[in-house]
Amino acid sequence: MCGILGYTGNRQASEILLNGLAKLEYRGYDSAGLAVMNDGKIMIEKNKGRLQTLREKINNGKNILGTCGIGHTRWATHGEPSDTNAHPLWSDDLSVVAVHNGIVENYKDLKLKLTEHGYKFYSQTDTEAAVKLIDYFYKQNKNPLNAITEAIKNIEGSYCFVLLFKDFPDEVWGVRKDNPLIAGQGEGESFLASDVSAILQDTRKVYYLDNMEIVKLNKGDVRFYDSEGHAVYKKLSTVTWDSQAAEKGGFEHFMMKEIHEQAKAVKDTLHSVIKNNKIDLTDVNLNSDEIKNISQIYIIACGSAYHAGVVAQYVIEDLAKIPVRVELASEFRYRNMPLEKNSLAIIISQSGETADTLAAMRLAKNNNIKTLAIVNVVGSTIAREADKVFYTLAGPEIAVATTKAYSAQLIACYILAVEFAKVLNRIDDEKYLYLIDELNKLPEKIDEVLDEKERIKELAGSFVDSEGAFYLGRNIDYAAAMEGSLKMKEISYIHSEACAAGEMKHGPISLIERGMLIVGIMTQKNLYAKTASNMIEAKSRGGFLLSVITRGSEILREESNFIFYVPEIDDHFSASLAVIPLQLLGYYVAVARKLDVDKPRNLAKSVTVE
Ligand code: F6R
C-alpha cells in the first residue's frame, strides 16, 4: 500500500525524502508528495502520478529548503488519484500536516462531528478526517502527544500516520495500528519509514514499533510512547540486509534481478535450518513434542503465498500424513469454521503485513490455535505476533510480483514437511537423508533452468497479442500452474486461468480458441499421462501447447508446440523448478508488451488494507 517517510536532522530533508520514497514506490505509485518545515513555515508539494513527476516539479528537491519533513507515495483507497487527494493532507491553518497509510473506517462519522465544530473538507480522502481530528485535539492544549493519544481513541480502522506540527519545527511524530512503521537512528538525524529499504543507505540501526505505539523524532533522538502517552523503552536492532540488495544491479527490472536471486534465496533459507545434514528448527522454536501433538494443519495466506501453501498441502500430506487445509486469509477470517483443537496454523507472508493474513492469524490465536509464521520481513507485525517464526532469507523483494520470496516460502514449507515426516516416523533415516540431499540440489538446478531463459524470451514474442491463456496441472503441478497463471495476468494483463487439468472438461474447455496458449506442467511422474491427455484434448480444440516437463520424459514430445524441460528432482520439490519458466514467461510477455513490469497497474506490494 502507501509508502511513508519522515526525516529530521541537519541535511536537506527533501532530497532524503525523494531518495527514500524511490525505494518505497513499490508500495504505491499513483501519487506522491512531501512536506518540509523551514523557518516556522511548512512547504507542501504533491501531485498525481509517479514520484518522478514530483522530482521534476521541485527540481530534485532543491526548490524546497528545510531539514525536517515527511513524504508519501500513494495507493489510492478513498478518493481517486488526484493532486488534491495526494498526501500530505493538512489542517486549515497548517498546524498539523500528515501522511497516512491504511483506512480510517469511521471517516464519515468523524467528518460529520468535525463539521459541527466548524471544520471544512477539501479532499475525498478518509485521511483528512483523521488529520483534522488530530488538529481538533491539538488545539486544546498544543501538545502533540496528547493530540495523538486522544485522536487514536476515536479513529477506527488501520493506520500509520506520520505528522508534522508547525509549532514544533524539528519534530516528526508517528503512530501505527496494523500498518508497518519503523524508526531509524542516525548520527544527529532520525527517520521514520514504512520499511527499512527506504533508510538503509543512511542507517542500519532501527526500532520496530509495536501496534498502537507512538514515536517522536528529534534530530538524532527517538522516543516512544504507548497509546496512553506513557514513555516506552525499545531495543535498537541492526538490519543485516545490505542496501545493494535493494538496487537493480545491472538488470533492467527488479523482477528479473529477483528471478536470478532465487538460487541464493533458496540456499540461504536452506542453510538457516539444515545443519550437518539435519534439520534444526531451534530458531523456529518448534520441538518434537509439539509436532507429535499436531492433528490438523491450517495454512493461511493470500496470493502467491497462498499458492506456496497449496504446494505445501500436497507435500505435507504426502510425506507427514497430517491433514492440511489451505485457506485464503480473506475467506478464513469470515468463515466461522470449527477449528480443530490440536492444530497448527501456518501463516505465510512475504511482507508480514498483509491485512487479511494478519487478521486471520489473530483469529486463529484467539481460538487458541498455535501459529507458525513463514515471513520474509524481519520485525514485521505477523512475525512479531506469531507464536513461532520461520524466517525466509530472500532479502528485500522490490518488484510487486513476487518471485524469490515465493521460492523461499516453498523451501520453508518443504523443510516443515520433511521434519514433520521424520518426527512422526513416516519416513526412515535413509529417506530423510535422501530428501535433504534433494533439497540441497535445488539452488544449482534453479540456475540450470535460468541458463535457458532465452528460449522462453523467444517464445514470449508470439504471445504479445494473446487474449487468454490456460495453465494446467495436477496436484503439485496444479499448485505451480496457479502461481504461473498469476504471474502472467498480474504483469502482462493477459487474462489467464489456472485449472486443475482434470477439471477442464467440466466447463473451462469451452473457452479454448485457435492459437490459445495452453501451458501444461508435468513433473509428477504418476500423473504425467493424465495431464498429457488433457493437453491433447486442448490441442484438438486449437490450443497451442507449451509443456513444462521433467527432463527424461518422452511425454507429449510429438504433440507439444514447445517443450521446456526442467531438471530432475524429487517430485515433492518440483514446483521450485517448474515455476521458473512460468515466471520468465510472464516477465518476457510483459516486457514485449512494453509494460511496467515492476509496478503493474492497480497493484501494490504490501496489501495492508482489507
Ligand atoms: C503476487 C504477489 C501477491 C502476494 C500477496 C501476499 O505476485 O506478490 O499475490 O503474494 O499479496 O503478500 P504477502 O506475502 O506479503 O502476505
Image (spheres, rainbow, N blue to C red):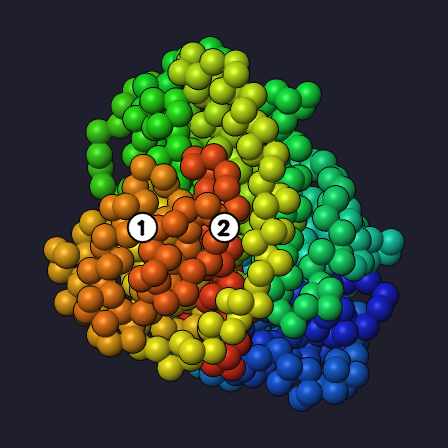
| Residue at left offset 62%, top offset 58% | 451
| Residue at left offset 41%, top offset 65% | 562
In the displayed structure, would residue 102 be above or below residue 132? above
- The picture places residue 26, in percent across and down from the top left corner, at 57, 66
- The picture places residue 141, in percent across and down from the top left corner, at 60, 58
Q: In this orientation, which residue lies closer to the viewer: 342 or 477?
A: 477
| Foreground tag (2 vs 1) | 2
Q: CA distance from mark 2 to mark 1?
A: 15 Å
Instruction: State the residue position of label 2.
Output: 566
Q: Is residue 280 visible?
A: no
The kind of residue on which mark 1 rests is Gly
Instruction: State the residue position of label 1.
Output: 473
| Residue at left offset 68%, top offset 68% | 251
| Residue at left offset 19%, top offset 56% | 504
Q: Secondary structure at mark 2?
A: strand
The label shown at residue 286 is: none
The kind of residue on which mark 2 rests is Val
The total of numbered circles placed on residues is 2
The quarter of the displayed image where residue 124 is located: bottom left
